[in-house]
Amino acid sequence: MIEIDIRVRAGGFALDAAFTLPPGFISVFGPSGAGKTTLLRAVAGLETPDEGRIAIDGAPVFDSAAGIALPPETRRFGYVFQDARLFPHLSVRGNLLYGYRRAANHAVRLDDIVDTLAIAPLLDRSPRALSGGERQRVALGRALLMQPRLLLMDEPLAGVDAARKIEIIALIRTVRRFVPAIVHVSHDLDEVSALADHIVLIEAGRTVRAAPADALLRDPDFAIAQREDARAILDGTIAAHGDAITTVALGRGTLAIPRAPLPRGAAVRLQVFARDVSLALVPPQSISVRNITPARIVAIRERSDAQVLIALETDAGALMALVTRDAVRDLNLAPGREVFALVKAVAVR
């Protein structure tokens, strides 16, 4: 378990953070200035809280009441900074070996990290000759080679272009097997949705909610409060491939998506935006939409004068639909009503 209960005061800013979550991928989400980086630096030991406790699997690295404050180098935490912070006087190989030589043991092999991150062609280059995405891959490799018991990532995709961002998100999901737990901070909900098992919501220096990612993202109140595009995330496995469609197994149901270059049985995370979900009272006939699934309305929330968010339960998992107030009235939609959810395959991310 990861236990954090700390207070940090710096000038006019105060951080009051408290949550306990199981190992996995934890994303700390909130706007700029909310205290995300301060929280991460306190966990790393780069900043000392005024009071509180930080413990991993019951072992404290900081406990003000017990007088415990382990220095950063003894905590066995890896840190990937927003700006990578590679050593400019070392080659890529030298930066990786710096992490490798500081590992308690070498259960994680250098070649495995190099192959997984696809950085073999970069080994003899200087950090100055790398793109932003390449620097972040090398920084991630260096941190993983230290074999940390906790990996900390501070806005690792800030400043990375959209194409490289998708690539690095896929790599981060792949390298999770090398580390027991990750705490990641971001203000980008797309990034958080793609990565997180749990989300810690932080606002104005206070942690206001900690919950499983799928539960938080499908909560219409969260989407409305954050003024973000409402979406659901669904974790499943590749079940079958057609000429242009891949079928993903999800819970007791399936979802058709554009053909994915993944083998059968591969784990996949899908993102379905509420704006891409339509509702019908009866299953439509002769329609191009590939996904038509029975659904039950769980909750209805007004998003604006004209728009309404509807939370749904289906055999494939929880979804949300964004519809007009007129549609709610004309279809007599209400919690408990049985409907059909329509999702275009090409809209699934």
Image (spheres, rainbow, N blue to C red):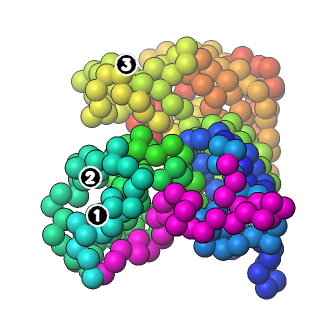
Contact, mark 1 vs mark 2 (Cβ under 8 Å) = yes
Distance from the alpha carbon under mark 1 to that under mark 2: 8 Å
Mark 3 residue crowding within 10 angstroms, few (<14) / some (14–19) / many (20+):
some
Viewer-closest of 271 and 67 = 67
Viewer-closest of 193 and 346 = 193
**Image quadrant for the N terminus?**
top right
Q: Residue 118, position in %: x, y?
A: 23, 53
Left or right position of 44 against 8 = left
Q: Residue 131, position in %: x, y?
A: 28, 72
Q: Which residues are magenta?
A: 59-88
Mark 2 highlights which residue?
110
- The first of marks 3 and 1 along the sequence is 1
Is-magenta flag for residue 141? Answer: no
Which residue type does callout 2 highlight? Leu
Q: Quadrant of residue 97?
A: bottom left
Which residue type does callout 3 highlight? Ala
